Amino acid sequence: MLLETGETRVVRESKTSVLKLGQEDKPDGQGVGRRLLWQGADPAFELSWWCGTCPLLFKRLEGATETLSLPEMQQTLNSGIDKIEDSVLDAFTAILPEGSYVPLLLHVQPELVYPGRKGDYFSEEQVDTWGISGFWGLPEYPQTPYYRTWQAPVNAEAHAFEFVVPMVPPNWNESSRVEEYAQELLNSSTPTAVALSILDVCAPAVDRGTDYYNHWGVTHFLLDGHHKMQAAAEAHRPLRLLSLLSIEGGLAQSSDVERLIQLRSQAQAPRIAHGPR
């Protein structure tokens, strides 16, 4: 559920920017380098390839080693927010990459998913469209557990999938804090997590699977709220997510981002397979 949409914020690069979206140095003989999310000077996640026809991807790398929680925001976020607050936006936009962002306050109920197990997008919906990797003979592998929160049709030819991706895996979380949040979430759905979000629109160039359509991947990289998100998944309870949705950082047009915001007001609905083209 979309609770509120805020005014677009323009972020300028500054000394406080901890994250960066963009291309790594091009290897010799290649036209482009990998598309990455950096945390400091280190690559934290490899993202979907630039072409827009390759499968959706968020692959955790060695640079994803810590959360980006801000101590001065903990009391506010633990109590939770009912509306988008300037003080929270000011604090978190200061660490974001340069660009334009639409703040979204979402009500989500996360499901924790492990690669290769039931519910894994990369082993199920993605394989149905792209098939397995022709080189590896396997599905794409994100190298991290992640959360699924919502999906819905865009139109007859496209479907949107939403993921919350932790900067560090759930087994790094303190179990006592997870239990505390689980108890709190039994009585309230307002505790709030914060994420940097991108939209990648991936349109397969050829039919290799059994269900051909365009995949809209909404990826929320979790900055604050790792314990809350795990607690919500384990307790089967909802919580709030403040998404800072990048307009330029994904593989999408600004009109696609606007369309996604409209879609996010709709109820969840699973994909109805239509078969190959």
Image (cartoon, rainbow, N blue to C red):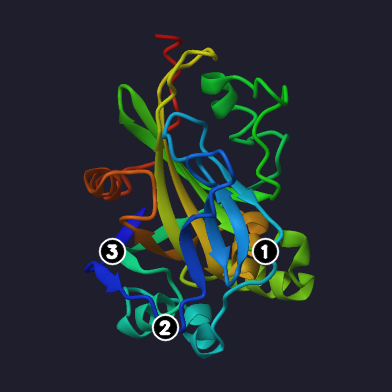
Is residue 238 visible in the rendered image? The answer is no
Q: Position of residue 210 (x, y in %)?
A: 53, 12
Q: What is the three-letter code of the residue carrying label 3?
A: Glu
What residue lies at 64% left-to-right and 22% top-to-bottom? 132
For marks 1 and 2, give the one nearer the viewer. Answer: 1
SS under mark 1: loop
What residue lies at 38% left-to-right and 36% top-to-bottom? 152
Query: Which residue, given by chain and number where applicable, does mark 1 sit on?
Result: 63
For marks 2 and 3, give the one nearer the viewer. Answer: 2
Could you say which disc has been placed on residue 92 in the image? none
CA distance for labels 1 and 3: 32 Å
Give the farthest residue toward the bottom. 72
Query: Which residue, given by chain and number where applicable, does mark 3 sit on?
Result: 4
Q: Which one is in front, 96 or 219?
A: 96
Q: As drawn, is 89 to the left or to the right of 119? A: left
SS under mark 3: strand
Give the farthest residue toward the front. 29
Q: Are marks 2 and 3 in contact (CB under 8 Å)?
A: no
Could you say which disc has been placed on residue 91 in the image? 2
Q: What is the three-letter code of the residue carrying label 1?
A: Gly
How crowded pointer 1 is (Cα within 10 Å; few <14, some 14-19, many 20+) is rated as: some
Q: What is the three-letter code of the residue carrying label 2?
A: Ala
Q: Which one is in front, 20 or 147?
A: 20
CA distance for labels 1 and 2: 23 Å
- The mark that comes first in sequence, 2 or 3, is 3
